[in-house]
Image (cartoon, rainbow, N blue to C red):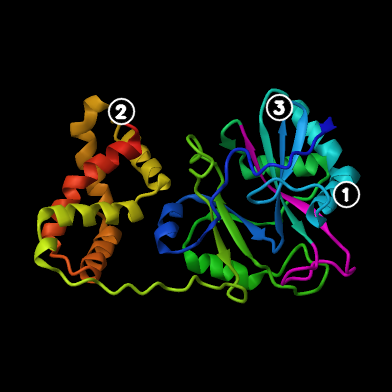
Amino acid sequence: MSTQFFNSNSIFPGKLNSLKELEENISRRFVNRKIVFTEKLDGTDVRFFVTNKVIRFFSKDKELLVGTPLHSSVISLYNSRYSKFVGRVFSLFEHSDLLLFFELVDNSKRIRYFNKDNGQDLYLYDIYINGNWVNWDDIFNVGKTCDINTVPFLEFEVFGGIDQVKKLMAENTSKVSELANAPMEGIVMRPFLEDYCTETPNNRLIAKFTNPLFYKPKPEVIRIPAPITTTGTGMGHYFAKAGEFLDSNIDEIDCCLWKDLLEKKEIEVNVKNLSKIMPVVVEFFLNEEHKKNIDEFCKANNLDLDKFLKGLKRILPSKIRKGLNI
């Protein structure tokens, strides 16, 4: 396999969102699903992009520049251990674009992984191919067959809530570190079956739980609500606020949940079925969690709840149609 280098800022399949921290609004999406828990390593994100028998090396958001320390480390590890692995994987998917995700760990961050100061290694944690995320058991088997590192597997269980993850964190130390009792940076959880990946690489159910020793929550933004004026009491004002609320409370995973719900109810997603689709999705959207969010939003913005709900129900169908691509 030939190796070429490109000094561009492009990346395939596009810049990916950072993993979201496991909180209640994400936690509900894992309920009753079989989940794979793996150790989250405190390292540097490295990606191998393989296409047309050419391999390119990326960090999290840009292509590695030749001559930089990170590029030199990756090339050294690639040549010594991973070139045969990449060639073997590519031979299985010769006509496919392939993205391999690794964590490069050394002793430069908060957790010391090696007894030697210059120790470093790569750990495979994800594979993206032809618009699909590969299931964890296949990633693990690839690593085992090709004798390369994969991030440590912790547990395979039906999701039981955030307390289950906290307990798992408390009972385990890092399985990668050569030092005894080194803490884990965190835990990553994903479904046993990757079934939220049909549209974009970000359309995926996955989350992280960061060890409280290392977790730094984003600073809370305090918003002082503007007083209601005579120009801000009409329905146009409420429509605008409803749109603002929906933009911050609907994401790609919500749209997948809608599609799953409609599929279970055997309602085909098309324009002809709008009269069946809308009441089902609207009722699903206005669940207890969103009702709580709506109450808090109205209080923060000095909005009349009844008027806001009218505006919300007026705007929501267009958001649903956009989310379902109909």
Which residue is depicted at the point 77% across and 60% down?
105
Image-quadrant location for residue 90: top right
Is residue 231 placed above or below 122 in the rendered structure?
Answer: below
Q: Where residue 268 is drawn, which disc sits there? A: 2
Could you tell me which secondary element the residue under label 1 belongs to?
A: helix
Image coordinates of residue 317 in percent, x first then y, are 22, 41
Q: 48 or 154: which is nearer to us?
A: 48
Could you tell me which secondary element the residue under label 2 belongs to?
A: loop
User: Does the segment drawn in magenta span residue 109?
Assistant: yes
* Quarter in which the C terminus is drawn: top left
Mark 3–mark 2 distance (CA, rounded to whole Å) = 33 Å
Q: Which residue matches tag 3?
A: 93
User: Does the segment drawn in magenta span residue 66?
Assistant: no
Q: Nearer the viewer, mark 3 or mark 1?
A: 1
Q: Who comes first in sequence, dot 2 or dot 1? A: 1
Going by the numbered disc 3, the residue's amino acid type is: Phe
Q: Nearer the viewer, mark 3 or mark 2?
A: 3
Is residue 162 placed above or below 89 in the rendered structure?
Answer: below
Query: Does the CB distance between marks 3 and 1 fall below 8 Å?
Result: no
Query: Does the CB distance between marks 2 and 1 fall below 8 Å?
Result: no
